[in-house]
Image (spheres, rainbow, N blue to C red):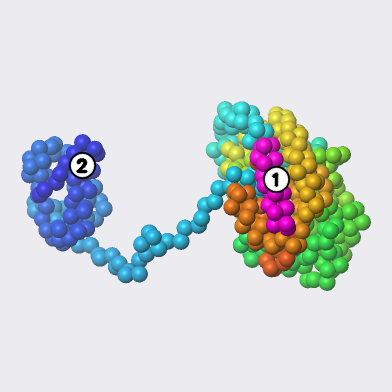
Amino acid sequence: MFINLNDKDYLYNQIYDSIKEKINMKQLKTNDKLPSIRKLSNELNISINTVSNAYYQLEKEGYIRSSERSGFFVEKSGHILRNDANFDDEDMIVEEKNTFKYDFSFSGVDKSCFKYKQIRKAFRDSINEDDDAILGKVDGLGLFSLRCSISNYLKDFREIIVNPNQIVVSSGSNELLILIKNLLNNPIFGFENPGYAYHGIGFYNNFDSTPINVNEDGIDIDFLKQTDANVVSVTPSHQFPTSAIMPINKRIDLLNWAYEKNNRYIIEDDYDAEFKYKLRPIAPLKTLDVNDKVIYIGNFSRTVTPAMRVSFMVLPKNLMNKFYSVLKSERCPVSIFVQSALSKFIDSGDFEKQVNQMKKVYAKKYEIIFSKINGCKYIDFEKTDCGTSVVIKVDKRIDRDVLLKTLKENSVYVIAIDDFYLDKNVDTNVFLIGFAKMSYDDISNGMDIIVNVVNNLVN
């Protein structure tokens, strides 16, 4: 039997691969007898053990069989049916991967603020100090030490007093909404329109839901009252993506809507509450919730890193009891290792330092954008002094698609607000400018391009 051996792999692997290939190519047919181990070892001038190991592997995988005192034979195998409709590589649709020099998308964090050294220390300490915990079973609510850290953080920075046992940790807002859906037995959700729920493929498809229009001061509560929704998801402190801030009278009206019926709840997504650049952060709706009907959601994607994929929710006490009975078998999808490290990062004070540094850096970025737009009469921009993105409204004489195409040709990425509407054909000429992950210089240069393109398209 001809087998070409070389020094690039173990000899028994080469014998195994060669015989397997001959069987698959039908050069060796069912019941064909193979050379004996001794004979093949002599032919190849290698040890008996090497051939024996190769035959052993082939036999274990069903390619050959051994018969006592008779030797080794090729085993019968099936024939894999080949579909003539198989595609060649060139027929595959590959999503275009665009890289923009000036990427004004709304995700990410500024890497200059990321405390690499302290994060590494938190992970090392988790291994050194919590070696038993990180190898254990994940509590359905999340690691208790992290829930305690979150509880203290909410008390100190968001004025929310909550028991750690009311906190549920998960890997994203979508996952938390699915937990709420299962907990409340498939309620009818009301989602802000425009809003994150309708961006891209839209996770709203996973829910029985209805869109609730957003006005300049938040969701249209009168419209909400006319729907069958019994759970409404809102971003009252900084509506995404319009940046609207819900005033106190409207917050009270929304709370009273929830208080009217036992099965009504409000989901408050406080997604970027830390980033208020003048005066104090806007108080959460949860701080007004005297009847415990607000489910508060937060995350660490904007304050630590999106890569961690850690979010949390605070459940009302009556839902917490139901969670224990209905969803007690749920597993927290975030690794204990990550949870332990994040807990240590928060408790050490480094998390607060990172957020404070981010606020200073982002405030400067915010002012750069404002200064660039302020001199362009074809762009409107209302200052809210919060968040990691701003909303600009462009002169209606400019075609939306032409603007986006021209910016793309200049390596500038922005996203149109109508991408966040259920009806994608809404003609708004409003665009979202995210700035968290961009450098000062890139923001300045990118905004110069945006202003120049707008001026040229009008003139």
Name the kind of residue labelled 2 in the image. Tyr
* Residue 272, disc: none
Q: Nearer the viewer, residue 399 or 287?
A: 399
Q: What is the magenta segment's predominant secondary structure?
A: helix
Q: Quadrant of residue 301?
A: top right
The correct choice, above or below, for 347 with respect to 430 in the image is above
Q: Residue at x 68, y 66 (%)?
A: 424
Q: Nearer the viewer, residue 448 or 180?
A: 448
Q: Residue at x 77, y 59 (%)?
A: 395
Q: Secondary structure at mark 2?
A: helix
Q: Quadrant of residue 182?
A: bottom right
The x, y position of residue 238, in whole percent, is: 79, 50
- Residue 453 is a magenta residue: yes
Q: CA distance from mark 2 to mark 1?
A: 63 Å
Q: Residue at x 57, y 29 (%)?
A: 124
Question: Residue at label 1?
Answer: 447
The segment highlighted magenta reads 439-459
